[in-house]
């Protein structure tokens, strides 16, 4: 464990670059064309290739993609080492093995989603573990924040696991959620992504640019209505905290924890991972520690410490499934090589 106590958590405002107006978003990015090609390829893969071969094919595609791409820049390599650590031969392993597997899990998650568009629909079948923690939290009648870790299978599989267990959660999201962030990508590509997820959701609460007031009201309404709310852990928010994490540090937006404190809602960590046998599991853990009678800030600090401790365990075990930007462009850095001074 590399964390400090909640008193050592650093809280600060969001860098201006991470809250952009619609005018700052390009109409189209070159990556969008590549993504469209991948979407067609993955959809055809889901039709023509047996499911047991999807991961192997995803690895082959990842290997081909990386063969034509540049090696990681020094700063990107150091960011990856936050997750996998340092040591002799580590850099060669990162380039030849880790990057392939890391990209393959992302590709497989897309294949699974696009398989839901096959003429004969493929049905995701993740296993849900820890439902009793959610049932107990809902019995309190204060609502529940399901704090979802950013692993490759978090989107479709988490929602499917909950819905198949009779849990219809709302999802706090952004209009860039999906395949693309450009304006055209949001209009044409992301609906393909979102439409499948909507089959397993009660509702989507969508942030658009800086317009947050309406969504904030709906968040409190969901929690005060004693309903579960899915929130993905990201570095994007008006207020964030940076904490020591494995071999570096992690930045986490604290908005969801703030709303949970206001509504007195429970906060349950959720981790969706693929096991070695290929089975995907969504694991709900017991609620984060929140000291009774503590100040609002101390409550958030305590929950962050508890959450990061649990996240470290899963990332150390499944590093190739943990999704994170390797560079901090546009203020999107989730993890960084150096811990904050404590």
Image (spheres, rainbow, N blue to C red):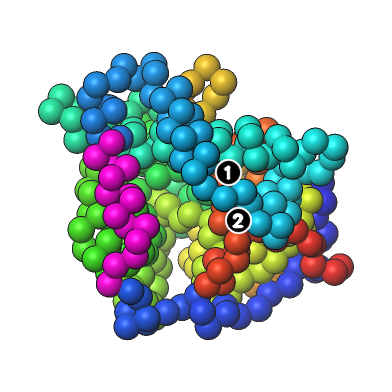
- Residue 1 location, x and y as percent? 81, 46
- Let me know if residue 69 is in the magenta part: no
Q: Residue 326, which numbered label?
A: 2
Residue depicted at 39% across the width and 16% down the height: 52
Residue depicted at 65% across the width and 40% down the height: 95
Residue depicted at 30% across the width and 20% down the height: 49
Q: Which residue is at the far left? A: 119
Q: Which residues are magenta?
A: 27-41
Q: Quadrant of residue 320?
A: top right
Circle 1: element type: loop
Residue depicted at 70% across the width and 35% down the height: 93
Using the image, determine if residue 329 lies above or below residue 142: below
Can the viewer see residue 86? yes
Which secondary structure dominates the residues rendered in magenta?
A: helix
The residue identified by callout 1 is 322
Residue 79 lies left or right of residue 223; in this view the side is right
Circle 2: element type: loop
Location of the C terminus by quadrant is: bottom right
- Between circles 2 and 1, the one closer to the viewer is 2
């Amino acid at each position: 464990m590399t964390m400090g106590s909640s008193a050592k958590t650093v809280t600060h405002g969001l860098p201006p670059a991470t809250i952009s107006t619609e005018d700052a978003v390009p109409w189209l990015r070159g990556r969008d064309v590549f993504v469209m090609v991948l979407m067609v390829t993955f959809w055809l893969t889901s039709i023509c290739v047996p499911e047991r071969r999807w991961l192997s094919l995803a690895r082959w595609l990842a290997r081909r993609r990386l063969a034509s791409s540049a090696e990681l820049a020094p700063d990107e390599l150091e960011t990856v080492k936050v997750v996998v650590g340092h040591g002799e031969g580590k850099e060669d392993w990162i380039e030849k093995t880790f990057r392939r597997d890391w990209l393959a899990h992302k590709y497989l998650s897309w294949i699974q989603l696009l398989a839901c568009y096959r003429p004969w629909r493929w049905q995701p079948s993740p296993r849900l573990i820890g439902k009793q923690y959610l049932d107990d939290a809902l019995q309190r009648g204060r609502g529940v924040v399901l704090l979802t870790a950013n692993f490759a299978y978090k989107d479709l599989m988490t929602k499917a696991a909950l819905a198949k267990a009779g849990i219809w959660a709302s999802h706090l999201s952004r209009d860039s959620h999906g395949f693309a962030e450009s304006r055209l990508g949001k209009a044409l590509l992301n609906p393909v992504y979102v439409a499948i997820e909507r089959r397993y959701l009660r509702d989507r609460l969508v942030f658009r640019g800086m317009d947050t007031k309406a969504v904030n009201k709906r968040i409190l309404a969901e929690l005060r209505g004693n309903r579960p709310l899915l929130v993905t852990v990201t570095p994007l928010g008006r207020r964030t905290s940076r904490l020591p994490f494995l071999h570096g540090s992690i930045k986490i937006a604290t908005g969801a924890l703030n709303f949970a404190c206001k509504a007195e809602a429970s906060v349950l960590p959720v981790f969706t991972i693929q096991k070695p046998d290929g089975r995907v599991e969504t694991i709900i853990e017991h609620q984060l520690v929140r000291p009774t009678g503590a100040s609002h800030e101390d409550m958030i600090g305590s929950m962050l410490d508890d959450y990061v401790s649990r996240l470290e365990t899963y990332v150390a075990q499944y590093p190739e499934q943990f999704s994170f930007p390797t560079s901090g462009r546009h203020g999107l850095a989730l993890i960084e090589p150096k811990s904050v001074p404590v």
